[in-house]
Image (cartoon, grey):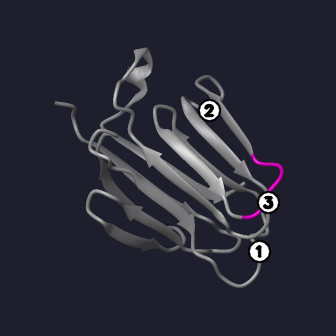
Amino acid sequence: MQEEIEITVENKLVTEKRDLNVYHHSTQSAHIISHNSSITLPLGTNLEKDYLHISVVKGPGYLEDNCLINLPSWADFDFTSKESVTGISITHSHEQSGGRIIVKIPPGPPSWELKITRPTRLDSNAQFMEKRDYVVIGDG
């Protein structure tokens, strides 16, 4: 049996101070996280069909600055955008990002969604997976 992994989602959106919506599938619970707040949730495996779904709560106006999402390098994720957004970049480098994945989203409407799952099979990079890990979403 694999050990439980906890993911802390941090909202560091300073410029717009928008809320984040975090849905945890295994508990079927939804949480709204305000600016400069966080929530920690357990993340099961893909076999357990567990995932975290994260999106920016819509509000008046566009996001005025780049948005950076900082993810653990071991995470499986699916990033989607409802709007046609150009300029999104995804960087994964153990040396440059401390073993993290960085998603950079240009300014615009808060129309993206991120689904994070835990891999079912851990490979040789499993040493990077911590018992507790984090996702930070903030201005770039």
The residue to which callout 1 is attached is 62
Residue 128: assigned label: none
Q: Nearer the viewer, mark 2 or mark 1?
A: 1
Label 2 to label 3: alpha-carbon separation: 27 Å
Q: Amino acid at mark 2?
A: Ser
The residue to which callout 2 is attached is 97
Whether pointer 2 and pointer 3 mark residues with C-beta atoms closer than 8 Å, the reply is no
State the SS at label 2. loop
How crowded pointer 1 is (Cα within 10 Å; few <14, some 14-19, many 20+) is rated as: few
Label 2 to label 1: alpha-carbon separation: 28 Å
Residue 84: assigned label: 3
Q: Amino acid at mark 3?
A: Ser
Q: Is residue 43 visible?
A: yes
Label 1 to label 3: alpha-carbon separation: 14 Å
Q: Residue at x 63, y 31 (%)?
A: 92
Q: Quadrant of the C terminus?
A: bottom right
Q: Residue at x 58, y 24 (%)?
A: 94
Whether pointer 1 and pointer 3 mark residues with C-beta atoms closer than 8 Å, the reply is no
How crowded pointer 3 is (Cα within 10 Å; few <14, some 14-19, many 20+) is rated as: few
Determine the main secondary structure of the stretch shown in magenta: loop
Q: Which of pointers 2 and 1 lies earlier in the amino acid sequence? A: 1
Q: Report whether 37 appears left or right of 82.
A: left
Q: Amino acid at mark 1?
A: Tyr
Foreground residue among 31 and 131: 31
